[in-house]
Amino acid sequence: MDLAQTGQRVVRLKGGDPGIFGRLTAELGALQKAGIPWEVVPGVSSALGGPLLAGVALTDRDRPAVAIVTATALDTLPWEALAALPTVVVLMGGNTLPAWQERFLAAGKPSTTPVTLLRDVGGARYRCWESTLGAIALDTAGVDLSPLVAVVGVWPEFPAPLPLAGKTVLVTRAAAQGEDLANRLQAVGARTLEMPTLAVLPPSTWEPCDRAIATLSDYDWLWLASVNGVESFWERLAHHGRDSRALAGVGLA
């Protein structure tokens, strides 16, 4: 507030959708009262994006309604009405799972109702549990579930679009070559740690290679054992002012 009143641009960054279980109304009210102009940039709530990322469709022809609730105020929720809905998403319910499980059951929700728990969707600690309303607390007893998105009423119905979500992959390629592999892994959901275990350096002397390049026409085959060998050979060939025509009649492997 103080910085904004001095004319500076201030960003209040919140994960997900700032209008879902945030303090958006109170914060905008304070800004409006202080006469500070503001702009809200909508986001995607974890209640919507999280399940879909894990292969869970919240609605369907057989599930025409969905409710999103927070487990931070269990006593204020209409449990009988929620139990009658086909799908309910419970946010921030990792530490209170037994409590909201009990309230659903007491309100008449069948114990066989599918439940999907999604921890840290899209993050390094991602994990998915598929169970039932009657068994989910026992199945996850003693497990740290936060941050949690719980879907009551449906299990994953299609393969998750990010098959490596929740996996951490150690990339050991040389520093100059690890980025491409890391990007490909991240594109399918993996968290990557780059720790190069080798370095590609020039030889102590180029004399044997230069001698071979000078007499390439005497060879039947040129064997290159890796992409590093290809790049180094090509650079050395260019160093001598030669190009691919120098390989005429030579087999390549």
Image (cartoon, grey):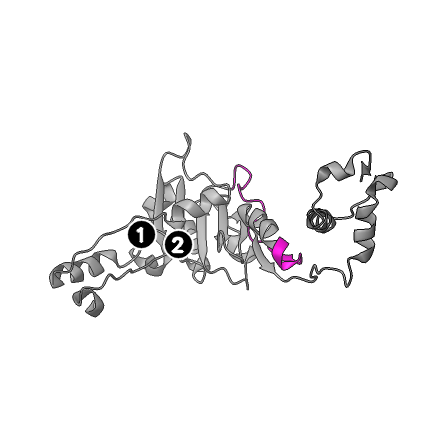
Residue at the outermost top position: 61
Three-letter residue code for mark 2: Leu
Q: Between residues 206 and 113, which one lies in front from this camera angle? A: 206
Residue 97, quarter of the rendered image: bottom left
The magenta-colored residue range is 156-177
Determine whether, in the image, residue 227 is placed left or right of residue 47: right
Label 1: few (<14), some or many (≥20) within 10 Å?
Answer: some
Residue 116 image position (x, y, % from top left)? 50, 47
Please identify the quadrant where the N terminus is shown.
bottom left
Along the polypeptide, which appears first: circle 1 or circle 2?
A: 1
Q: In front: mark 1 or mark 2?
A: 1
Question: SS class of the residue under badge 1?
Answer: loop
Label 2: few (<14), some or many (≥20) within 10 Å?
Answer: many
Q: Between residues 56 and 2, which one lies in front from this camera angle? A: 2
Determine whether, in the image, residue 77 is placed left or right of residue 123: left
Residue 188, quarter of the rendered image: top right
Label disc, if present, on residue 91 of the rendered structure? 2
Quote the CA–CA distance across marks 1 and 2: 10 Å
Contact (CB < 8 A) between labels 1 and 2?
yes
Determine whether, in the image, residue 79 is placed left or right of residue 151: left
The answer, for residue 133, to whether it is visible in the render is no
Determine whether, in the image, residue 246 is placed left or right of residue 114: right
Question: SS class of the residue under badge 2?
Answer: strand
Q: Between residues 1 and 96, which one lies in front from this camera angle? A: 1
Three-letter residue code for mark 1: Ile
Report the residue marked by disc 1.
Answer: 20
